[in-house]
Image: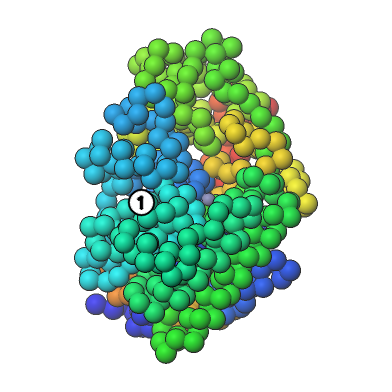
Amino acid sequence: MRAEGYALAMTKATIVVFDGLRPDLVRPDLTPNLMALARAGCRFPNSRCVFPSETRVNAASLAAGRPPQSHGLVANTFHLAGAFADRAVRTSEMADLVVAEQALGGTLLQGPMLGDRLAAAGRRYATLSTGSSGGSWLLNHRAERHGHLRWSAHGAQWSSPGSRWEEIAARFGPPPAAAKPQSARMRHMTDIYLDYVLPTDDPDIAVLWLAEPDYSFHYAGLASREAREGIAEADRCLGRIVDALGQRPDAADRVVVAVSDHGHVLVDREIDLVAAFSEAGFSADKRAQGEALVGLAPGSPTLATLRRSDPGLLRDLAAWLGEQPWCGLIFTPGTPDAIEGVVPGTFARGLVGVEHARVPDLVFTLADDDRDGAAGLDGTRWNDGPIGQGAGMHGGLHAREMNNLLILAGAGVRAGAVSDLPAGILDVQPTLLHLLGMPSGGCKGRVLSEAFHDGATPVAARRSLSLNLGRRRQTLNLSSVGTARYIDRGTSALG
Ligand SMILES: [Zn+2]
């Protein structure tokens, strides 16, 4: 049943994901097509991704319409000893995710996903990705079961059905090799969508995942020529998609969503966490199971498993972390309705969406600040791992990591509108389901009603929470609209 007028308008939606695009890079010189889409539709400058501000976490959250503590893909790197005892799950690799899925009896992703909802309603879903094989799988992990199309630039074995990947490759050629920037791959994927998927499947909801600018930010730098070219090419792909959809007979009934999965800041300081922990007397390794006192899944954030159940040790570790200049915010177990976690002075994991059995007792981000990172792009941070100084990174709670691109345009959407209300990547799914006249029960986001001609403008609430852990003061800025919750930013400083 369609409850509100604007729900009558839409027939089909295309979601175009710009991996890692900061909204402040939507500029006339770089992204004329995103600028045009915003003029034709509604822009959400206060949109947020979910924490951790990582790619696979947000891909899963887009597909779930729910935060990590609800769907279970809690970080880009996390330990699952039943699947891999000697290392973390590499969520970028579909092969790892399939092993984890089998180890968990088919519950790696928990609760209904977008593909499940559309299949149950007899509707078609298709995903095309130039990102990692793991990221592609998380968007559409039951494509095989539902008969949906999942196309990955990585090959037939990561796509479904593989026979259609081969059919596509025979017609369009194999996907171009990886390059900085990934322009050729993104053009290739756009060709496939426009000249094959749209005329044949014309799915009710399609997701197209553009690997730029994330790829070039990580491997060439935030202010690099490669990143600028990658952004410009991704924008040209969007322009082609919007033009082609505009020529369809049902153009007036279609919606286009442009969204990014997180922002980026500059890495300007590096830390080796295993060494730092060990030097402080907390022996550590990166294994899921091991002899050391602490098992680290170093990422952004870092998940630290205490291998001895000892509340005193947890307090000691949190107190030591609180004194380290490279440490950001610290979280311990605690429900979404709590503020403080089990260790006084630390925030509850549930406040930031990661209160889940796969998240260990201690979670921390690395320190950041608002300094100029590169070419006028504010935001710098510490990092542990292969992404070193001069590169872009994300995963933490910096405002520029959490602020993502979100533009909605098409059927029933007010042209040239700007909503200053809190919004986020979790709102995409309930909004599109509403437009399709489908129930969105279980989704944790909201219908972005203010974007539509006959939609209501809801009321927002904002709060700032602060805690002291020794000399460290930690602050979380949170927003909400009804029951939809958003994390604006987290800051932390040593007094
Ligand atoms: Zn990403």
| Image coords of residue 306 (percent x, y) | 41, 19
- Label 1 element class: helix
On the rendered image, what quadrant is the C terminus found in? top right
Q: Is residue 276 left or right of residue 348?
A: right
Rendered residue at 24%/77% (across/down): 1
Rendered residue at 31%/61% (across/down): 163
Q: Is residue 70 left or right of residue 384?
A: left
Mark 1, residue position = 157
Rendered residue at 35%/16% (across/down): 309
Judge whether 87 appears above or below 244 on screen.
above
User: Can you name the residue that lies furthest to the front here?
Assistant: 170
Q: Is residue 154 left or right of residue 96?
A: right
Name the foreground residue: 418 vs 299: 299
Q: Is residue 444 left or right of residue 129?
A: left
| Image coords of residue 492 (percent x, y) | 61, 35
Amino acid type at image mark 1: Gln
| Image coords of residue 445 (percent x, y) | 40, 59
